[in-house]
Image (cartoon, rainbow, N blue to C red):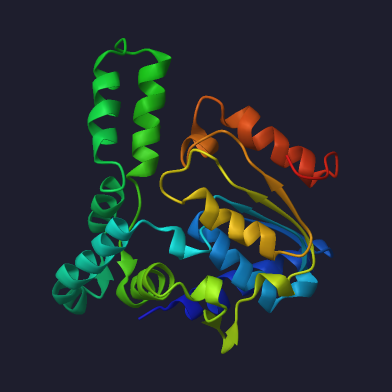
Amino acid sequence: MPTLDDLVLGDLVPAIEDVANRTGAPVTLIGYCMGGNLALAAALECREAIAQFAALATPWDFSAVEPRHRAAVQHMLATTEPVSRVTGTLSFDALQLLFSQIDPDQVQKKFARFSGLSAGSFAEQLFVAMEDWVNGGADLPADLARGCLTEWYLENRPQRGEWQVNGQPVLPQDLHCRSAVFVPSKDKIVPPTSALALGTSLPNANIFLPRAGHVGMMAGSAAKSKLWEPLVRWLTYKTEGVD
């Protein structure tokens, strides 16, 4: 059954090295949310192949997670374990239920707004596309899910320097390439202080603090100005310093 190590070492690292070999140049690596954690671990395994690294709304210090959310993770793991042992997966629906508990009123509010949109309007199409994206995930291999939820959320191993891949701790201070960390200040899924901890640990990081939420920063109506334009400027060396 795939683990975090398998994902980093068996999938990400070979893909990065293949691109670097094909292009003859080190690559830019970008990770969103937990993808930033995995991208960092992969970058540390093949540092010569990495030119730039960007983490978007990536959790690092899980002590910032509210106690009620940590309790929800513990409860979910306990209740889903019997099924996970049989299926070998943690269902995507269980994860979505967990995320919905972060802000239970938000589900009702967003569908109330949706009910007021004009049929066939661009706003309605955008809402549906966003919901399809948010709810279009796959079940996770059980061992991989346990690694994320137990080692990260419950034990805070990344911030403590105890999360290991390939037998080595994943330490952001060991990645010396040019880096950018985007910390959306209105994020309810990844507390800003959790993501900021990664930015302050990377030696050569530019930290950006867009006024946006976790999903809105990526795909909301202001995503272009809040994330994509600043990211492109950073990637092309047209901006420096802290935003």
Between 210 and 9, the residue placed more toward the observer is 210
**Residue 9, quarter of picture:** bottom right
Nearest the eye: 141 or 195: 195
Across the whole image, how many numbered discs are drawn on residues? 0
Which residue in the rendered view is the most extreme toward the bottom? 167
Asked if residue 195 shows in the view, the reply is: yes
Q: Quadrant of the C terminus?
A: top right
Quadrant where the image shows the N terminus: bottom left
What residue appears at the point 77 percent right and 70 percent down from the top-left corner? 49
Q: Is residue 221 above or below residue 31?
A: above
| Image side of residue 102 versus residue 26, left or right | left
Left or right placement of residue 128 versus residue 211 in this view: left
Q: Quadrant of residue 79?
A: bottom left
Q: Looking at the picture, does residue 13 appear above or below residue 242?
A: below
Return the residue found at the far top: 118
- Specify whether residue 58 is in view: no
Q: Is residue 151 above or below residue 215?
A: below
Q: In the image, what residue occupies the spot 67% across and 78% down?
A: 45
Direction from residue 233 to residue 45 in the image, left or right: left
- Measured from the top left, where is residue 141 in percent x and y? 33, 71
Residue drawn at x 49%, y 60% is 34
Q: Position of residue 19 (x, y in %)?
A: 71, 64
In percent of width and height, residue 54 lies at 67, 54
Q: Residue at x 46, y 40 (%)?
A: 215
Q: Quadrant location of residue 124?
A: top left
Q: Is residue 59 left or right of residue 23?
A: left
